[in-house]
Image (cartoon, rainbow, N blue to C red):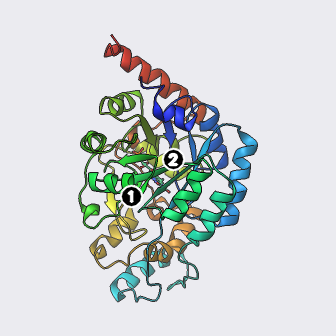
Amino acid sequence: MWKANPITSRLRVKWPIIQAGMAGGTTTPELVAAVSSAGGLGTLGAGYLSAERIRLAIREIRQRTDQPFGVNLFIPEKFDGESQVSAPVSAAMNEMREKLGIPADWKVTRFAEPFEEQMAAVVEERVPVFSFTFGLLEQRWLSVLKQQGTTVIGTATTVREAVALEASGVDMITAQGSEAGGHRGSFLPDSPSNLVGTMALVPQIVDRVRIPVIAAGGIMDGRGIAAAFALGAQGVQLGTAFLACVESGAHPLHKQALREASDEATVLTRAFSGKAARGIENDFMIHLAPHENELPPYPVQNALTRDIRSAAAKQNRPEYLCLWAGQAAALSRDVSAGELVSRLVVETERVCRSLRWGE
Ligand SMILES: Cc1cc2nc3c(=O)[nH]c(=O)nc-3n(C[C@H](O)[C@H](O)[C@H](O)COP(=O)(O)O)c2cc1C
């Protein structure tokens, strides 16, 4: 059954439809609560939030809904904040600053929010579901979360990563295909360049692990959901589809770009953050594309481009915004999150009926 399975019973949701945690202000408490209230699982993308802002957002979600929800964080990576950016990269970024009328050579004071503090907030708030990306969660955090009954979900982009996540003790795995919008969750050496698509990835992971698998990447409607279940997934995670919703905090020009996107609109880039991510191609990506191999890794490049992205948002300049989107962005719908969840359910049932499943 697509709607009553180990994922719905473990997450205590009506529908196995998860709204992806999307860091960067998209997953407002309003969006998260609307998805959870509609019977799906809303997720707060907290990767860029301080511990204090995570606590406040969780409290606001709880004021808006009594249904389960999730919080999503980034597994931190070691980085060298002192490393010198090459002169051509620095010049290319300053050219964009000049076009935006902001000072050259921006000085970064904070590269990433302290993960220990973020995790402490998640644990203290006893969230129902915790999901993460970019790595494996340390055992000490896994055991605390499990002791208090939090369901833990890790992200894999290859079978090797899924096997490593299962061995680490997570409860479920999100299988993220290369169609997916936003950052790739890849964490094992060599995997970022192996772009396994959702259709190929999901059944291979399902065959190799015993825990439930959630499909992500390019799923926008009931056809995608039914396909994911046919491949053996027991849940789906949608990012881009919820990005376009009324309650999402995405910049209005980002939402407009989704509406105007075609199947060929997105590319993978390291330009914004130093980590491979999929978004709608714009001048920012094109300008830094010749320097793709010289860019500092995440989170350094992410911090170095922050001033450009925030000036672009304030000045309504989509050519310098990061317009994360999956390959199926053109199928996004400009509706409320509750309406989207209802439509997804009706559509999935229609597809299942048309395929005569269950007969
Ligand atoms: C704007 C945006 C931000 C994202 N941020 C995160 C994040 O903070 N954490 C995470 O695990 N995944 C993040 N993702 C990836 C999603 O979890 C998911 O894999 C992806 O959206 C699925 O593909 P789709 O966009 O085609 O639905 C993000 C995706 C988008 C579009």
Q: Residue at x 48, y 77 (%)?
A: 304
Mark 2 in CB contact with mark 1 (< 8 angstroms): no
How many numbered markers are drawn?
A: 2
Queried on whether the Cβ of the residue with tag 2 lies below 8 angstroms from ligand 1, the answer reads no
Task: Tell me where residue 350 appears, x and y as whole percent.
Answer: 41, 17
Task: Tell me where residue 326 appears, x and y as whole percent.
Answer: 38, 48
Of tags 2 and 1, the one toward the viewer is 1
Q: Mark 1 highlights which residue?
A: 185
* Residue 286 drawn above or below residue 169: below
Task: Tell me where residue 351 appears, x and y as whole percent.
Answer: 37, 20
* Residue 7 drawn above or below residue 61: above
Would residue 142 be found to the left or right of residue 285 on screen? right
- Helix, strand or loop at mark 1: loop
The 10 Å Cα crowd at callout 1, few under 14, some 14 to 19, many 20 or more, is many
Placement of the N terminus among the 4 image quadrants: top left
Placement of the C terminus among the 4 image quadrants: top left
Task: Tell me where residue 59 appears, x and y as whole percent.
Answer: 73, 51
The Cα–Cα distance between marks 2 and 1, rounded to whole angstroms, is 23 Å
Q: Which mark is residue 255?
A: 2
**What's under tag 2, amino acid-wise?**
Lys
